[in-house]
Amino acid sequence: MTDESQGVEAAGPPWSVDLLADLHAGVLDQAETVRLWEQVNADPAALEIIEALAATTADLATVGSAAVPPMPDDVAARIDAALAEAARDSLGLAPVVGIDAARRRRNKRIGWATGVVAVAAAAVAAVVVALPQGTSSGGGPVAAPPPASQQAPLAVQSDHPEAAIRQLSTGVKDYGALGSADKLSACLHAAGFAAAANPIGVSPGTIDGQPAVLVLLTTGTMAQFRVVAFSPACGVGNAGVLLDKVVGG
Amino acid sequence: MTAAVPTDADLIARHASGDPQAFSELVRRHRDRMWAVALRTLRDPEEAADALQDAFISAFRAAGNFRAESQVTTWLHRIVVNACLDRIRRKQARPTVPLPETGFNEPATPRDSMSDRETRLVIEDALDQLPEEQRTPIVLIDIEGYSVSETARLLGIAEGTVKSRCARGRAKLAKVLGHLRNPDAIANVPGSESKRPRRRDT
């Protein structure tokens, strides 16, 4: 084992690099340290070794402060996909798949061609949780959410409002018949929501077969959301709330 | 009007209150830095990717317990380092081919003619020649900036052992990196029980 140090009895020319490395690293006790430094400071050969050790730690520090290469795209996509899965898991929207199981699946992929396809799929999956709320992030390029028109119509039954979460949690902001965020704000205000209410997702759809604009809001509790369905006719003075339910948590 | 960019702490709070996008934004901000940490600690890109995935999922689940007294980056960094160390421990539990101890006295490449980038590659190559037990504490202390006591806690070993392993590793690195002008001429007195010094921190 390499944890053994040289005793101060070994001090003096020719100097042991290991002993001076111990001194430099603070391995020795106080009395030994004081005594040895006196000898080292009086001997240029010993000081040369100490300076070499100091130069080594200075070199190492440059590695830590150096500009870092970006995370490879395939790794980033993989992690985004894993986080998307964890997010769905926390919402109870998908069967729980452990990291090990996911990794076993991934390890079955063979070759770069398969890897590229997997990365593309992961990037799509990442959209589930990786999208900013209508603004660009301060980081790298971010995939945009698919337009609501490319998704299946959001048909929700009032006794299963949690079915809306998957689609609305993608960050989609399609105001449908309301047409704009301002119109939705008027509906939210009319329904008594705070002015600061910032929907995670908005999409036209149906509630129990009736046309609606569906809105997903946070509640302040982890993994708990509020699903609200507004009539397309809602606005100032007309709340038009067709559904208002808290799910999850 | 441009919305104010949320701080890391804001994103953690939003994540804890159920915003499904906040944590991904946090990861996007810091993933390059954490990738570098994982890569330096584990050396193998595949291992580093696995460790980062474990770390970010762990952080995702633990973020609700994050307390604002520490920096988010410090908290995240520690989770990543722990995930890397877990992998090193698991790897050490499996039979491995020992790293060669030879080569430390080979002439060092002249450093003054190299660019900074090349210098860093030389340093990283030199680090790769160290046994894991020396390399890991050196990475944590000299590169990542952890204290000896933090490193001891992370690795589950005594502070004196951390210092001793760093000392051994730095001595080897000083030779490999060419800082010792004539390392062969400098005697390394073999260790012996009778000469073992009194440790300050064990």
Image (cartoon, rainbow, N blue to C red):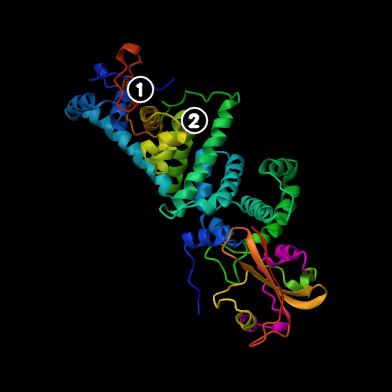
Above or below A141: residue A28: above
Of B22 and B188, nearer the camera is B22
Q: Position of residue A34 (x, y in %)?
A: 19, 28
Identify the residue at horizontal 54%, vertical 31% (top origin). B89
Q: Quadrant of the N terminus of chain A?
A: top left
Of B1 and A240, nearer the camera is A240
Task: Classify 10 Å Cα crowding around label 2: few (below 14), some (14-19), many (20 and above).
Answer: some
Q: Residue furthest top?
A: B194
The residue beneath circle 2 is B132
Identify the residue at horizontal 50%, vertical 42% (top origin). B81
Q: Specify whether residue A177 is painted magenta.
A: yes
In the rendered structure, find residue B184 and report the number of the disc placed on it: 1
Identify the residue at horizontal 46%, vertical 33% (top origin). B155
* Residue interval drawn in magenta: A158-185
Q: Residue furthest bottom?
A: A237
Q: Chain of mark 2?
A: B
Which mark lies nearer to you, 2 or 1? 2
Q: Position of residue A195 (x, y in %)?
A: 55, 78
Of A90 and A45, nearer the camera is A90
Q: Position of residue A232 (x, y in %)?
A: 73, 82
Q: Position of residue B100 (x, y in %)?
A: 51, 24
* Residue A210 in sight from this viewpoint: yes
Element at label 1: helix
The amino acid pointed to by label 1 is Asp
